[in-house]
Image (cartoon, coloured by chain):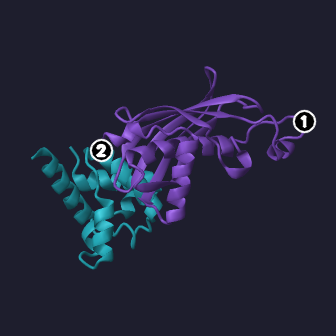
Amino acid sequence: MSSTYDQIATIIAETCDIPRDTITPESHAIDDLGIDSLDFLDIAFAIDKAFGIKLPLEKWTQEVNDGKATTEQYFVLKNLATRIDELVAAKGA
Amino acid sequence: MQIEYFQLIDRIVALNIGEKTITVEAQVPEKSTIFEGHFPGYPIMPGVLLTEAMAQSSGWLLLALLKFERMPFLAMIKEAKMRGFVSPGQLLTIDAKIEHEGSGFAVTSARVRVGTELKCSADLTFRHVPFPHPDLRVHMDAMARKIGFPQQAISHE
């Protein structure tokens, strides 16, 4: 079974037509991969379906806008994978 | 239907909050300036307007699910397929259902029929936000009354 990171990297590659080998765990979805908010909706849709969760995009955006979090915490892919694992774990708890 | 005012929905026929589905009807007018250009001698309903009708139908479903607290805006159209011509005077039946409810967005699928004949279909993505202007909320309330939005469908949720 592939890791959470591998799954989201594949989703991003397929959704945004980005070569898979250019995506790394350190990639920032926005700053490095150039994914805009509309494309990220597509990615969120695919992630929600793949993992059976609901990415709290509005909450994350609010936290970033309020200075309570950085975009790196949510949009660097290794961190995004960790957030997804947390949401999956919380769902199963 | 008042095409020129982008009012593409006439009435809500069924709204099922539990199933997250809606069915609406829309009567294509016999005459419109749009048909003069689309097309001379062979008037048909533009595909973009059929797509808009599916978006408006989905939008009313989302407004219901969001209890009129947030306004959905069309963000993405996928798999839009115009399967047959729609002519002036035809009655459209539009079905929409929720495919996914995300954080600040939702995905619907919708289709337009004339009788039993499927005319078009699409998958639509919406962003939804708190009403950006009070006038818009007033307008949507007025439109809801006009198209027979069943307020009781959401009042007991």
Observer-nearest of A49 and B34 = B34
For label 2, the residue is A50
Q: Mark 2, residues whose alpha carbon is within 10 Å: few (<14), some, or many (≥20)?
A: few
Q: In this rendering, would B88 be left or right of B84? A: right
Vertical position of residue A61 compared to residue B148: above or below: below
Q: Tell me which chain the residue with mark 2 is part of.
A: A
Circle 1 or circle 2, nearest the eye: 1
- Let me know if marks 1 and 2 both belong to one chain: no
Q: Residue at x 41, y 48 (%)?
A: B106
Q: Tell me which chain the residue with mark 1 is part of.
A: B
Observer-nearest of A33 and A41 = A41
Q: In this rendering, would B83 be left or right of B99? A: right
User: Which element type, helix, strand or loop, lies under badge 2?
Assistant: helix
Question: Looking at the rendering, which quadrant does residue A1 occupy?
Answer: top left
Image colour for chain B is purple
Kindly tell me whether residue B79 is visible in this rendering.
no
Considering every residue shown, the one lying at the far left of the view is A93
Considering every residue shown, the one lying at the far right of the view is B41
Kind of residue sitting beneath label 1: Gly
Q: Position of residue B75 (x, y in %)?
A: 51, 55
Q: Which mark is residue B145?
A: none
For label 1, the residue is B41
Q: State the cyan chain.
A: A
Observer-nearest of A52 and B97 = B97
Q: Residue at x 48, y 34 (%)?
A: B22
Dividing the image into 4 quarters, which one contains the N terminus of chain B?
top right
Vertical position of residue A44 compared to residue B43: above or below: below
- Is the residue under label 2 in contact with that under label 1 (CB below 8 Å)? no
Q: Position of residue A60 (x, y in %)?
A: 29, 66
Kind of residue sitting beneath label 2: Ala
Q: Residue at x 37, y 60 (%)?
A: A21
Q: Position of residue B72 (x, y in %)?
A: 47, 53
